[in-house]
Amino acid sequence: MSLLKRSVIVLLLMLLIGGTIIGGCSNKETKTAELIPVNLVEVVHSIFYAPQYVAISQGYFMDEGLDITLTTAQGSDKVMTALLSGTGDIGLGGSEAPIYVYNQGQEDYVINFAQLTRCDGSFLVGRQAEPNFKWEDLKGKTIIGGRPGGMPEMVLEYILKDHGLTPGKDVQIITNLQFTATAGAFKGGTGDYVALFEPTATLLEQEGAGHVVASIGKSSGEIPYTVFMARKSRIERDPEMLQKFTNAIYQGQIWVDQHSSQEIASAIASFFPDTDIDGLTRVVERYKSQNTWSTSPVMNEESYLLAQEIMQIAGELSNPVEPAVLINHQFAEQAILKSP
């Protein structure tokens, strides 16, 4: 073969390879550009929300054509602020928050459309191991609790009252600390007990600074504790995006339900770089064993009424809202029908 022919063949091959690479990059860029951006605002960052992180790590959102940007608000009130200001498209927070917004007379109020957890995800941590712990033992003690009006604090008070203890009289509860400061305050010597979410509770155990003595979720019963929500106008304007989002969440719920604690821990490990895999597995098993996670995004209206009863007992709600007003079942039900 002549030198000229060899040169032509090499040139053609280079052009072919180059075109393939360029074409491949172009397709990838086009695919990325076609994804719908969604700003998801979570109330706190916790293993409690494992199905959400699984939906991200397993690519279920991308499969639905969504590009998720996840931010942490540190409080359901801040989730509401993000949604009402338009900086957040979808919120993950306590089911009590939309009730407050609605009762304040907000016309473009916030509506729940998919449930993630079905009980409180916090644990009562003491300074010593108490294998025979009883809630009645808290009489005369001080607990570091949550924000007044927030579901964690209201559920804690509901349990105490259910066991014959009056908050502020029989038990002192500290409620003026930021969510991120409670564990540090406990380690510093404040209080006899502290209510903590995971992985913070387990981290304290690993450090020898505390011991989980009770599951607040197991003691309170089933409620729609954490739900996905969006403004009424967003639901009316963008139902296709919300349907895609709910489809992905449901796939995450199915995956979590069908996999072991160790497999779930591995799937969400990148979201919790400060927690080792053994600690993650331990936390996941703790949540999984008490049926923390909903296996369906459809909200249970009966448990939603219980949540409002808890709010009334706490003195935070005088005007209950009919579930049909603040719950949209459309996307959750359709996600189940669509699932293979």
Image (cartoon, grey):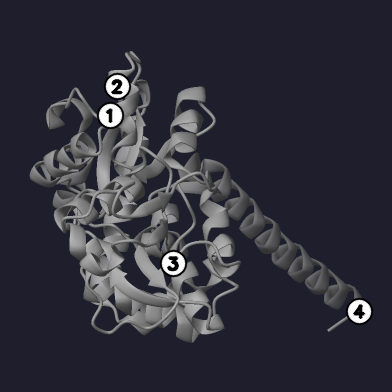
Q: Which mark is in front, 3 or 1?
A: 3
Residue 110 % position (x, y): 33, 27
Residue at 57 percent of width and 60 percent of height: 185
Disc 2: which residue? 102
Q: Farthest right residue? A: 3
Quadrant assignment for the N terminus:
bottom right
Q: Quadrant of the C terminus?
A: bottom left
Residue topped by disc 3:
192
Residue type highlighted by circle 1: Ile
The residue indicated by pointer 4 is 3
Does residue 148 appear in this view? Answer: yes
Kind of residue at disc 4: Leu
Tell me how many marks there are: 4
Q: Position of residue 117 (x, y in %)?
A: 27, 56
State the separation of the CA atoms marked 2 and 4.
80 Å
Indicate the secondary structure of the residue bearing disc 2: helix
**Mark 3 in CB contact with mark 1 (< 8 angstroms):** no
Vertical arrangement, residue 236 with respect to residue 33, above or below: above
Residues marked 2 and 1 touching at CB (< 8 Å): yes
Residue at 27%, 73% (x, y): give it: 288
Residue type beneath disc 2 = Tyr
| Mark 1 to mark 4 CA distance (whole Å) | 80 Å
Label 2 neighbour load within 10 Å: few <14, some 14-19, many 20+: some
* Residue at mark 4 to residue at mark 3: CA–CA distance: 87 Å
Q: 244 or 311, which lies in front?
A: 311
Q: Give residue 99's mark.
A: 1
Q: Amino acid at mark 3?
A: Asp
Residue at mark 2 to residue at mark 3: CA–CA distance:
37 Å
Q: Position of residue 31 (x, y in %)?
A: 53, 49
**Nearest the eye: 3 or 203:** 203
Q: Earlier in the sequence, mark 1 or mark 4?
A: 4
